[in-house]
Every structure is written in C-alpha cells, then in structure tokens.
Image: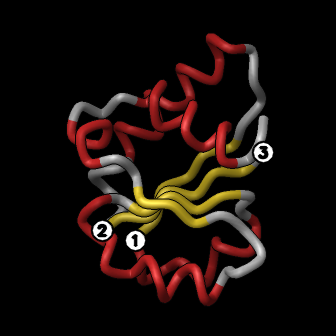
Amino acid sequence: MNILLVCAAGMSTSLLVTRMEDAAKEKGLSVHIEAHPVGDIEKYGDQADIILLGPQVRYQLKNVQKKYANKPVEVINMQDYGMMNGAKVLDHALQVLGK
C-alpha cells in the first residue's frame, strides 16, 4: 500500500511519516509512505493508493480530487496533524481504503 502525504513544502510532514511508519510496524503492516510538496504531486500521485493533504494545503482538495478521480483524496484532520498522531492518520487512511 502506498500513501502519499502532500503539504506546502514537504518538510513538516516528514515527522508524521515517521510516526505513521512506526504505527504500521506495530500493526504488522507493510506500507510505503512518502511526503512531498503539493507542487510535486504530479511526480508521485499516480503511484499512491491514497493521497492525504496536510491542512495547510486543503485549499487544493478539489483540484487534487479532480486530477486523481480514481483514488481517494482526503485532508488530514487538523488536530491529528498538529499532534503528529501518526497512528490516527494511518487508521483513517486504512479505513478509507477499506483495510
């Protein structure tokens, strides 16, 4: 499973990626999670099973949903993002994907 996190510069989300990977390991899941700036979404979006937008780029939701109509595109809950709650963000992605 490939999860793409998209934020303004790709840096603020790197800690969240680490925490999501830790949560996935605890669950025994094999997931590939990357974080990239919204400007690079065309390079990485096709490989993703789900695209999660950071709250700071939620204004891009409709554009990204239109571009990737064949896959789920969600905005990360602002509180979970702020708390860097990787387990909750991962659980949400899994729920959306029906896993």
Q: What crowding class fits label 1: few (fewer than 14 Cα within 10 Å), some (14-19), or many (20 or more)?
A: some
For the residues carrying marks 2 and 3, which lies nearer the camera in this image? 3
- Mark 2–mark 1 Cα distance, whole angstroms, equals 5 Å
Tell me what residue is drawn at x 63 percent, y 88 percent: 67
Camera-side residue of 93 and 34: 93
Secondary structure under tag 3 reads: loop
Query: For the residue marked with disc 2, what is the amino acid?
Result: Ala
Q: Which residue is mark 2?
A: 9
Check whether the beta carbons of the residues at disc 2 and disc 3 lie within 8 A of each other.
no
Camera-side residue of 98 and 42: 98
Viewport quadrant of the C terminus = top right
- Which label was assigned to residue 1? 3
**Percent of width and height locating residue 79:** 24, 39
Tell me what residue is drawn at x 63 percent, y 79 percent: 43
**Percent of width and height locating residue 15:** 35, 37
Q: Give whichever of discs 2 and 3 has the lower sequence position.
A: 3
Tell me what residue is drawn at x 44 percent, y 27 percent: 19
For the residues carrying marks 1 and 3, which lies nearer the camera in this image? 3
Q: What crowding class fits label 3: few (fewer than 14 Cα within 10 Å), some (14-19), or many (20 or more)?
A: some
Q: Is residue 11 left or right of residue 18?
A: left
Q: Which residue is mark 1?
A: 37
Secondary structure under tag 1 reads: strand
Query: For the residue marked with disc 1, what is the amino acid?
Result: Pro
Query: For the residue marked with disc 3, what is the amino acid?
Result: Met
Q: Give whichever of discs 2 and 1 has the lower sequence position.
A: 2
- Mark 1–mark 3 Cα distance, whole angstroms, equals 20 Å
Check whether the beta carbons of the residues at disc 2 and disc 1 lie within 8 A of each other.
yes
Camera-side residue of 97 and 5: 97
Q: Is residue 81 left or right of residue 90?
A: left
